[in-house]
Image: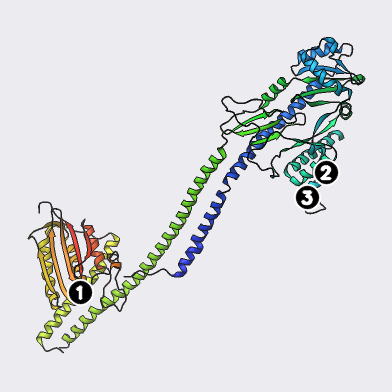
Amino acid sequence: MKQAGLKPHLGIFFIAAVLFPSIILSVIAIRSLSREEAFIEKRMHDTLLAEVTHVSSVVAAELNTIEKELNSNTAHLNRDNPEDFLKAWEKQNNLVEVPFLVSGTGEIIYPSYETNPSAAEKTFLDWNRQFFRGEVKIPVYENIAVAYKDEIVKDDNRNYYSDKSERRKSPEVNYSLSQESANIVGEQYQSQQAINSWEQNLPIRQKIYDQAKQTGKSIVMRQVQIEGKSEKDAVLPQKESMFVSEPLSFNQILSKSNSGIIPRSINENLKLIFWRKTEGGRVVGCVINQAALKDRIVGLLPQIYSSARIITVLDENGKPLILPKGVGSRNWQRPFVAKEISSILPHWEAVAYLANPGMVKIEAGAVTFIMWALIMILFISISTGGFLVLKSLRSEMALARQKTTFVANVSHELKTPLTSIKMFAEMLKERRVADEAKKEKYLDLMVSETDRLARLINNVLDFSRMEQGRKQYVLKKENIIVLCRELIEGQRLRLENNGFVVNFITDSNEVMAEIDAEAIKQALINLLSNAEKYSDGGKSIDLEITHDASRVYIQVKDKGKGVPAADVQKIFKEFYRCDDSLTARVKGTGLGLTIASRIARDHSGDIVYKAREGGGSVFTLILPVKAGS
């Protein structure tokens, strides 16, 4: 029976609903793989940026703490004996390297060249005498975003809202606070808003840089270069610092505040000078001890090394304050992430490095490999699943068509012998046939048609029992040669009457096997019936038996038209017929070979087909034999 072909619109539906979407999803996934390295790098960058931002904030807060601490130390300066006070202060506080006292006119009262100064004090006097007098100016640093916060917030609000009537509002202030405290909260919020906008908005940043340059301020350049980042990236840090410098004299600095810390570069080393106004216009202060300052900062750092990253702080020369043991040399001025700390520590930065510089590529490669594997598995699964669904659908459609054709063929097969039997029975009943020879012939035909009808019904019933697993066999030790000889002799008269030459060939008189005799007979009858139906001109059927030590081979040979090569793999399938149309010359249900094959397999044997030389078919029933037979 030919299988039903799949309708074209089902194939189109499969492509449109299954294959095409899976291809689109695969393409999208593959395109996303090209951005996987950038995505992983961005994720690592964001994670490490949060860490270095925290470190930067902690260090900046510590600088404020140090300033408050030094302010507190100098709050009660002994006016009568300031030198003793300053010496005691230096001994008690390890942050104090060179304490000093400056008069209202800018003259350094302590230390002095007359008091046999130490090397550090002499250096201090050499570098700062003119500065305190107001004769020279030094660069003073400030956060550009805070300095220009009003302009930045104004531009940011203008760009943030499409509705010009709406403006970003400051946070609600708790009016239970004093007005001064409320103003501080508002200032802090505005300053932070300005810093965020400056960092994230390149046009605003460039505009503020230009304004600073026009007012005579200099843009400080950073000493680090962010690894793998484009300077055109508006969100990430640039080579330009967020600090600007302006040359100011000491008097100008004093006019802006009552105390502070001045960063000053001496011989490419950063020195921090703490100062505080006291009574009488004098200024007391100290040079902050660099080693003590670094120790305090290092004590604030989190665990600096993990399997993923290294976090530390770079000084003004781009050298790490501390490094974990065993870390090899690298270009410390090319961190993965960096964050500037404070205008008090220009060029100092909190930085993070990948523990393994190739980590991004390694992780991206691993993720890419996994994604490729998942994409291929997904694509293959969808394609295979869709194909199996289509194949199953095709099989179901073919089976439905086969069953429909089977019902029609069975009906036709049942009707034909019944019609013949009825016709001959009526003729004999009505005594319309006087010739005894014709009566005998009609009776033989009725018996033949009855046998044909019985075989058809038995095939259908046996197939049903096999499908339901209810077919039972009564196995007994039988002589295959005797069984086959009796079978062929029982069919010989009918076959010879139909013009067939029947031959029985065997190489032995006894081959014993454990079989269900009736089932094997039915299988052989189906093979003989198949040979009879498909034999045209060459009406010859041979039943040949051979055997070896373990198997017996029962061959049914005919000289018919044979089986087309395209149908050889399908002839044992249920309902399959090479020509299943109702107008086919050879009638049948497509169950004969199926039942014969099932019976053979149930006996631990098989049935195989091969084309016969010179034309025709050879079906071989193979059965196991009893040892020693």
Q: Residue 312 carries which label?
A: none
x and y percentages locating residue 155 in the rendered image: 80, 47
Q: How many callouts does the rendering have?
A: 3
Name the residue nearer the viewer: 412 or 534: 534
Tag 1 near tag 3, CB within 8 Å: no
Which residue, given by chain and number where applicable, does mark 2 sit on?
151
Q: What residue type is labelled 2?
A: Glu
x and y percentages locating residue 442 in the rendered image: 15, 82
Q: Residues within 10 Å of mark 3 (few under 14, many from 20)?
A: few
Q: Earlier in the sequence, mark 2 or mark 3?
A: 2
Q: Which colour scheme is used?
A: rainbow
* 211 left or right, relative to 327: right
Q: Residue at x 80, y 37 (%)?
A: 146
Please, what secondary structure does the residue beneath circle 3 have? helix
Q: Quadrant of residue 500?
A: bottom left
Alpha-carbon span between mark 2 and mark 1: 104 Å
Q: Residues within 10 Å of mark 2 (few under 14, many from 20)?
A: some
Alpha-carbon span between mark 2 and mark 3: 12 Å
Q: How crowded is mark 1: few (under 14 residues within 10 Å), some or many (20 or more)?
A: many
Tag 2 near tag 1, CB within 8 Å: no
Please, what secondary structure does the residue beneath circle 2 have? helix
Tag 2 near tag 3, CB within 8 Å: no
Which residue, given by chain and number where applicable, does mark 1 sit on?
535
x and y percentages locating residue 219 in the rendered image: 78, 37
Q: What residue type is labelled 1?
A: Ser
Quick one: quadrant of the N terminus?
A: bottom left
Front label number (2 vs 1): 2
The vertical placement of 77 against 534, above or below, is above
Q: Which mark is residue 159?
A: 3
Name the residue nearer the viewer: 114 or 206: 114
